[in-house]
Image: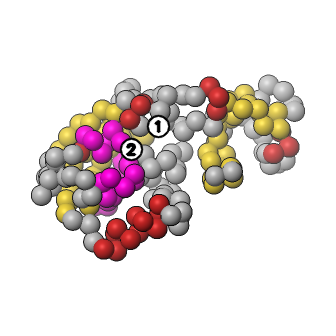
């Protein structure tokens, strides 16, 4: 069976940047599974997998427009220093999880030049970057009724759509620290 719209797909993957720096991979013996067309992975990766079958390997390069988008300057904001923990020495590059109006967000400290506010970047940490996937397709099949129901529950707001704390789930966006 080949990967098409609404296939259950399991892949072993390695994600790196153009520099070759590895930023994520599937744990040994734990293929990452998802259903195509359900918005569980970035569009560029899904497109690159279409037509592949179990056993196929691929190198897929995904430009920012098909991943997390370009860096949006409007997402650089000044936040009052009082919104951060008192006992924390805040430095550029630090990441914090915060609650936004639409749920949890990850923010990256860009500048701490004044004592009143902290400049943060609310862009996804992988925004503006070209992503390089080395993928092996482990499994392709029709999704089960339970798997389809779980996807529908995620779309309805039941859960954040994240995988484990240990990986970014091929770009699901919940944990990329």
Q: Which residues are magenta?
A: 25-48
Q: Which residue is at a point 64% across and 32% down the rendered structure image?
A: 75
- Give the crowd class for mark 1: few <14, some 14-19, many >=20 residues within 10 Å: many
Q: Is residue 42 above or below residue 152?
A: above
Residue sitting nearer the eye, 78 or 111: 78
Which label number is shown at residue 42? Answer: 2
| Image location of residue 49, percent across then percent down | 23, 45
Disc 1 on helix, strand or loop?
A: loop
10 relative to 1 in the view: left or right: right
| Image location of residue 111, percent across then percent down | 72, 28
Q: Which residue is at a point 26% across and 66% down the rendered structure image?
A: 143
Q: Which residue is at a point 31% across and 58% down the rendered structure image?
A: 35
Q: Residue furthest bottom?
A: 146
- Give the crowd class for mark 2: few <14, some 14-19, many >=20 residues within 10 Å: some
Instruction: Determine which residue is flagged by label 1.
Output: 68
Q: Contact, CB < 8 Å: mark 2 with mark 1?
A: yes
């Amino acid at each position: 069976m080949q990967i098409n719209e609404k296939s259950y797909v399991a892949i072993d993957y390695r994600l790196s940047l153009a520099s070759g720096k590895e930023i994520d991979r599937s744990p040994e013996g734990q293929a990452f599974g998802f259903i195509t067309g359900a918005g569980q992975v970035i569009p560029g990766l899904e497109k690159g997998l279409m037509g592949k079958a179990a056993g196929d390997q691929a190198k897929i390069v995904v430009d920012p427009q098909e991943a997390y988008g370009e860096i949006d300057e409007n997402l650089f904001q000044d936040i009052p220093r009082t919104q951060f923990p008192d006992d924390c020495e805040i430095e550029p590059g630090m990441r914090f999880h915060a609650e936004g109006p639409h749920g949890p967000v990850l923010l990256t400290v860009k500048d701490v030049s004044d004592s009143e506010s902290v400049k943060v970047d609310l862009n996804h940490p992988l925004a503006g970057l070209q992503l390089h996937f080395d993928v092996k397709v482990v499994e392709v099949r029709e999704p089960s009724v339970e798997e389809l129901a779980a996807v529908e529950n995620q779309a309805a707001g039941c859960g954040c759509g994240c995988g484990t704390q240990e990986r970014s789930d091929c770009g699901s966006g919940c944990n990329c620290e």
